[in-house]
Amino acid sequence: MEIPSLELPSLEDSFLADPSQFWHNATAVRIVALLAVGLLIATVWLFRRKERSGHGAAIICLVVSIGLHVAIIAFVPRLSLFFSGTADGEPTDSAGMESIDVAVFAPEMDDSSVATDDALAEMLSPVPDGDSPDFVTSIEPLALPQSIASLSVPIVETKAVAEPTPEPINIPEPKVPSVLASAKVSSADHATTLDDMLSDWLEETLSSEEPEEQPEVVVDQDVDSSTNPASMDVAEQPTAPQRETVRQEMPQSATTQHMAAANQGVPIESTHAEKIDEDFASRIGTAKFAALRASGGNADTEAAVKAALQYLVKHQREDGAWDPAQSGAGQERAPLGLSRGSAGKRAETGLTGLALLSLLGAGHTHQFGDYQDNVYRGLAFLLGKQRADGSLAGDASIYAAHYCHAMAALAVAEAAAMTGDEAAMEATRRAVAYSRSTQHPTTGGWRYTRGDKGDMSQLGWQAMLIDAAVRSEAITPPHSMQRGVARFLDSVSSGSAGGYACYRPGERATVTMTAEALAIRLLTGQHVSAARVREAEAVLLNSLPGKTAGPDNYYQWYYATMALHQLQDDAWHRWNASLQQRLLSTQQRDGSWPDSTLWGGYGGTVYSTSMATLCLEAYYRHTER
């Protein structure tokens, strides 16, 4: 079957083609900075002269110097430099630990961590390391016959204000299969009938296939829900632009094999799943529902995921992006008592990456599933935003840039791993090369600019990007980067068994960083001792979802859920029960989760909904190691 593939755009970073790129060029910014300082020195020298004839020239130099300084302050930090920081005595986030949670878009920092002028001048400007054999020292843009404009994705102008929230009474309940609809009603014997409901669900979805031989079937590549034997109907899908209609042979034996295996309770993978890495194979076909049943998911969690995905695609822009303004992102609520300058206000690529990760996590790609067109347009948007140096940060501020890059790049890498799409694989190579250029050569960490020593919050996204890129076979294992990740993880570990983790070396351990460190160790194949696991689990179980004071922290829950799912022990069962109870009870009628969470003001409803959805997809998103 022919399948649509993305086309990587030719990248153009010339100042003449796009004047806004001037302030992204480190050399140009250095020249402007040196000129401003030189004029200021000249001003002082002219004023100190005894002759008054030079005072007029001094005033001119002073005015020009001030103008250049204002330009540097206005454009280089992207308006967010002076609005991030930390303070002593912030409130803690867990019982039994003196800890501080970390923002997904702008974690706390102290005065010593503010980037220097040189670091800001070199922001997002990679310096290839010729000593490392893992990557080539430069990346040439692809010379493809078509540009991103050939995708025929209409570009819409971003609205300055968020969409008004619709009245709940006017929003219909998402349509779900009859088994799922009945499962949403509480009953005393719910737990005992779960297996029967899932079996009925499989029979209901599989029975929709024709048992008779079908020598030829016309498949629309934009909306192809019939390709997945376990897919659910989606109410009122938006009409997708037609790209291509192809024909495929479908032998009867394939259908018979699926039906026989389903009736025997044997999890098998769809034809599509055979092409992807084993870590993502449980997202597809009957293997998905076998993993769901085996690891603690149920019909209620899948109904919640279905409703959430419908909400996300409904709020996707025509150009494929998810809009921070329409999502309500960038609201400053000073979580933990700190103002971070409305972080996330321009995190367009980051939010788009999170929404795509939610769709990919449920098995939907641009070549397979119910949301092919939505994933296609989202990936096309990201590829169109990727700069020549590989960065996917977009227009995000300095304190959101590396988060946005890693989140967007992880979505592209997972798409590459699940489909083998060559454009996605090339974009992944570029993205990892950019991450390599910004990794600290000694500590192995990442933070806000190249040269920063790193923090644990940033490390998690970058480590998952590297793992997905390797699994996609877009790159060979980058051993120097992987050793750096392991080195940084060790530097932030504490506790008698090393089970705790802090934000930066030498700081207090936190619940969020402990969860993130444990998840990264488990998901990237590191050996984790039983003692370290027990120590970390004790911390996480003291902060069960919905059982602690303060707003919900989906960022913490995301990493804790991924980590504990890998363990499948008593701690996982306790965590999973609390997680389901809290998330299912707080989901809105339109499928979203509110932005009233700890960091929801910065990311809006797209952030909150995506993170909650990723938690509920944990049963099959990553295969158990």
Image (cartoon, rainbow, N blue to C red):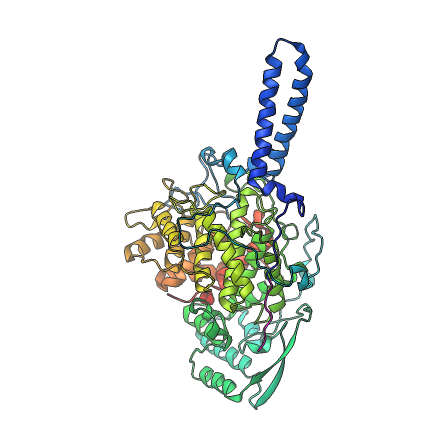
Give the side of residue 281 with respect to residue 506, left or right: right
Front-most of 128 and 483? 128
Q: Residue at x 67, y 54 (%)?
A: 165
Q: Residue 464: x, y in percent?
A: 45, 57
- Judged by its main secondary structure, the magenta piece is loop
Quarter of the image containing the C terminus? Answer: bottom left
Magenta stretch contains residue 2: yes
Front-most of 595 and 443? 443
Q: Residue 411: x, y in percent?
A: 53, 59
Q: Residue 103: x, y in percent?
A: 50, 46
Q: State the extent of the magenta-drawn residues as a range.
A: 1-7
Residue 613: tell me if it is visible.
no
Quarter of the image containing the N terminus? Answer: bottom right
Front-most of 504 and 559? 504
Q: Residue at x 47, y 85 (%)?
A: 257
Q: Is residue 32 above or below residue 491?
A: above
Q: Is residue 203 above or below residue 493?
A: below
Magenta stretch contains residue 534: no
Q: Residue 291: x, y in percent?
A: 44, 71
Residue 523: tell me if it is visible.
yes
